[in-house]
Image (cartoon, rainbow, N blue to C red):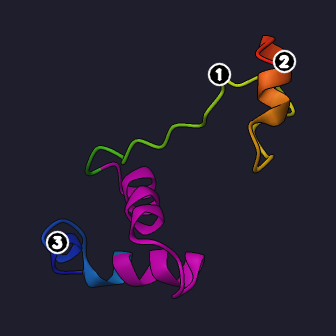
Amino acid sequence: MSHWCNIYTIEQIQEAIALLGQDTTVTRITAVLGVKYRIRDLPVMWEETLSPPGTRTEGSLHRYDQLVGVI
């Protein structure tokens, strides 16, 4: 919070927290502040797109092994 106060006003921080809820992550609040006020660079969030469709949500690598021919 002290870091945000060096960059944003208390009202801006309060608005972002009210929008996202008190249980949200620091990264999300920082991203909303950055997008809305364009004062800082946004934290980098990458979506994993290299795995074949259907393999990203499984807890096992068995399906991935089948797709790449290991099994």
Q: Mark 1 points at which residue?
A: 50
Can you say which quadrant of the picture contains the C terminus?
top right
Pointer 1 and pointer 3: residues touching (CB < 8 Å)? no
Q: Which residue lies furthest to the left in this view?
A: 6
Q: In which quarter of the image is residue 44?
A: top left
Residue 23 in magenta stretch? yes
Q: Which residue is drawn at 47% across and 74% down?
A: 16
Marks counted in the figure total 3
Q: Residue at x 85, y 31 (%)?
A: 63
Q: Judge from the rendering whether residue 21 lies leftward or rightward of residue 53; answer left or right.
A: left
Q: Residue 52: image x %, image y %? A: 78, 22
Nearer the camera: disc 2 or disc 3: 2
Q: Quadrant of residue 31?
A: bottom left
The residues bearing labels 1 and 2 have C-alpha atoms spaced at a distance of: 13 Å
Going by the numbered disc 1, the residue's amino acid type is Leu
Say whether disc 2 or disc 3 marks the residue closer to the N-terminus: 3
> In this picture, which residue range is highlighted in magenta?
13-38
Say whether disc 1 or disc 2 marks the residue closer to the N-terminus: 1
Going by the numbered disc 3, the residue's amino acid type is His
Q: In which quarter of the image is residue 49?
A: top right
Q: Residue 43: image x %, image y %? A: 36, 48
Report crowding for label 3: few under 14, some 14 to 19, many 20 or more residues within 10 A (C-alpha): few
Q: Mark 3 points at which residue?
A: 3
What SS does tag 2 mark? helix
Residue 41 in magenta stretch? no
What SS does tag 1 mark? loop
Q: Mark 2 points at which residue?
A: 67
What type of secondary structure mainly makes up the magenta span? Answer: helix
44 up-or-down from 71: above or below = below
